[in-house]
Image (cartoon, rainbow, N blue to C red):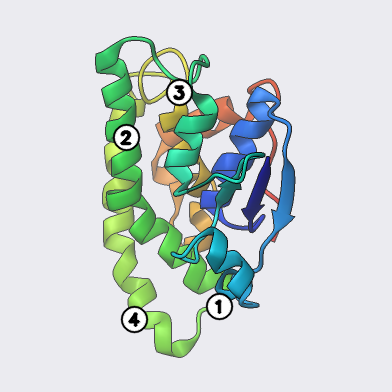
Amino acid sequence: MNIYGDRLSGNCYKVQLLCALLDVPHRWIDTDILAGDTRSEAFLALNPAGQIPLLELDDGRTLSESNAILNFLGDASDWVPEDAYQRARMLQWQFFEQYSHEPYIAVARFINTYLGLPEERREEYLSKQEGGYRALRVMEQQLKNSEFLLGARPSLADISLYAYTHVADEGGFDLQGFPAIRAWIGRIAALPGYRPMAPN
C-alpha cells in the first residue's frame, strides 16, 4: 500500500506511528502541502478533497481522514477494543480529537511551525490557546485516573490524541501544568516499536 503524507504533520504521524507499532508494510510518499503537492491533478484524482494523509491500497482503492485510516489499519488488532462500549469510547475520543483538540492545538502549531507565526495570523494563533488548554484539561482529568485514555491498555484513541499533544509546545502550549499528560506521553514513547515524529 502507498501512504501519502507530510512527516511533520500530526495527522500523518498518527498513521506512521500505528504502522510502526503494528509493523505494517507500506510505501511512504512524501507530500508537501505548502509546495502544492495536494493540489496537483494526479493527487486530486486520488483524493478530490486534496488532503493528507491518504492511503492507497494495492487494488487502487483509497481512504482519507487520519482517524478513518487508523481504524482501517488497526481493525482486529489489540489497538481496537473487542467490547462494543469500549470501542464507542475509543471513537468518542477520536471525535473529540478532531472537533475539540485538533482545531486548536494543531492549527496553532501550523501557524507557528509551518508559517513562522506571521503577524497577520498572530491574532488567530492567540485565539486558539483557550480552546487548546480546554482540551488538555479534559485529557488531564481522564489520565489522572487511568494509564491510557480507555484504561490500562492503549488504543487508537491514544494514537489519535498523542500525535498533536506531544508537540503541543510547538503551538505555544505549556504542558508543565499537566503531569498526567506528560506521564502518558512517556508511556506512549516507551511502547515497543514506537517511532518518533520527524524533527522540524
Circle 1 sits in a helix, a strand or a loop, which is it?
Answer: loop
Q: Quadrant of the C terminus?
A: bottom right
Q: Residue at x 56, y 74 (%)?
A: 39
- Do callouts 1 and 4 mark residues in contact (Cβ within 8 Å)? no
Tell me the quarter of the picture where residue 180 sits.
Answer: top left
86 on left or right of 62: left
Measure the alpha-carbon separation of dots 3 and 1.
Answer: 32 Å
Residue under label 2, please give it: 93
Q: Residues within 10 Å of mark 3 (few under 14, many from 20)?
A: many
Residue under label 3, please give it: 155
139 on left or right of 7: left
First in residue order: circle 1 vs circle 4? 1
Q: Amino acid at mark 3?
A: Ser
Residue under label 1, please give it: 115
Q: Which mark is residue 123?
A: 4
Q: Amino acid at mark 2?
A: Trp
Instruction: Classify 157 as above or below 64.
Output: above
